[in-house]
Amino acid sequence: MNPHLISLICLLLTSCQIWKTDIDRDKTFLLKIISMFFRDDTALIVTSIIPKNSSTSNYRNTNVFIGFNKNVAGITKQQINIRPNNLSTSIEGELVTNGKFIVFTPATLLLPNTTYTVSISAENGLSSSYEYQFSTGSEVDNTPPSVLSTSPEIGETNFPINAKIIVNFNESIDPTTVSESNFSLQGNPPGVLSIQDQSLLFSPNSNLLPVTAYICVIKSGIKDIAGNQMVRPYSWVFSTSETEASTCFFDLGIFGICLYE
């Protein structure tokens, strides 16, 4: 082969390799710059716990839920210690991360009439350590959750178009099972679902339609904190008024808001 041709080929190959290296380096640099803009540097803090701090008579098959101010990543089983007060070692169980929650499912029933201490060490983004206690009773929960009451009520008319929808259950609800897949409101208006102990709250992003009938459905995917699942869905019908509610005539203290704003 012509030696000049060989030299040209070698030069082109070298240039291509340098060009590719530059592209790879620039791409890596660009990704780092982008990640700096979109990185969430908010400190990770505990915002909710189930069972509640200092609560008593909890079921022996309860799971432990710890909620945070943002989605959790990196929390390990080694960071969490759940132990009876008369023992120094943590109980065995499974730890699962689900959005803003970590859920600990004990491998066996908790001891009856016993105080447990739950502690989380300040690692993997958690800003500070956290510790609380709860106590068990003697019973096991094998009963699925059911709806006790709703706002609006069944068949209610003139429901304010700026109202929040509340569903009250007979027991504490697993917050990780509350989602758009098991809650529906006719027309699928966008909004925010939240859970507070035994109550589910749906806050529409904008007013509901005036003088309109709505069907609301709670599907059977919702579970209590012991893992018992609703047996049957629950649905009801209500209709809205023409106007907003301008005053707070029912203060729902557990949410720190007015039911009608």
Image (cartoon, rainbow, N blue to C red):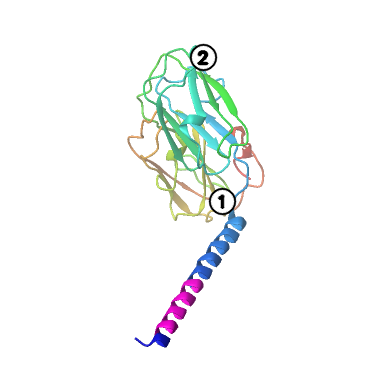
Q: Quadrant of residue 235?
A: top left
Query: Which range of residues does the magenta coloring cover?
Result: 6-19
Label 2: few (<14), some (14–19) or many (≥20) C-alpha neighbours in 10 Å = some
Per the image, label 2 sits on a secondary structure element best described as loop
Question: Disc 2 marks which residue?
Answer: 85
Label 1: few (<14), some (14–19) or many (≥20) C-alpha neighbours in 10 Å = many
Relative image position of residue 87 (x, y in whole percent):
48, 14
* Residues marked 1 and 2 touching at CB (< 8 Å): no
Q: Nearer the viewer, residue 91 or 19?
A: 19
Relative image position of residue 195 (x, y in whole percent):
51, 38
Above or below, 159 against 103 in this view is below
Verify whether residue 9 appears in magenta: yes
Relative image position of residue 88 (x, y in whole percent):
50, 16
Question: Disc 1 marks which residue?
Answer: 161
Per the image, label 1 sits on a secondary structure element best described as loop
Residue beneath the point at 58% across and 25% down: 131
Above or below, 140 against 151 in this view is above
Q: Is residue 174 visible?
A: yes
Q: Quadrant of residue 120?
A: top right
Q: Is residue 225 visible?
A: no
Relative image position of residue 221 (x, y in whole percent):
37, 40
Q: Nearer the viewer, residue 132 or 157?
A: 132
First in residue order: circle 1 vs circle 2: 2
* Dominant secondary structure of the residues highlighted in magenta in the image: helix
Which quadrant is the N terminus positioned in?
bottom left
Outermost residue on the right side: it is: 247
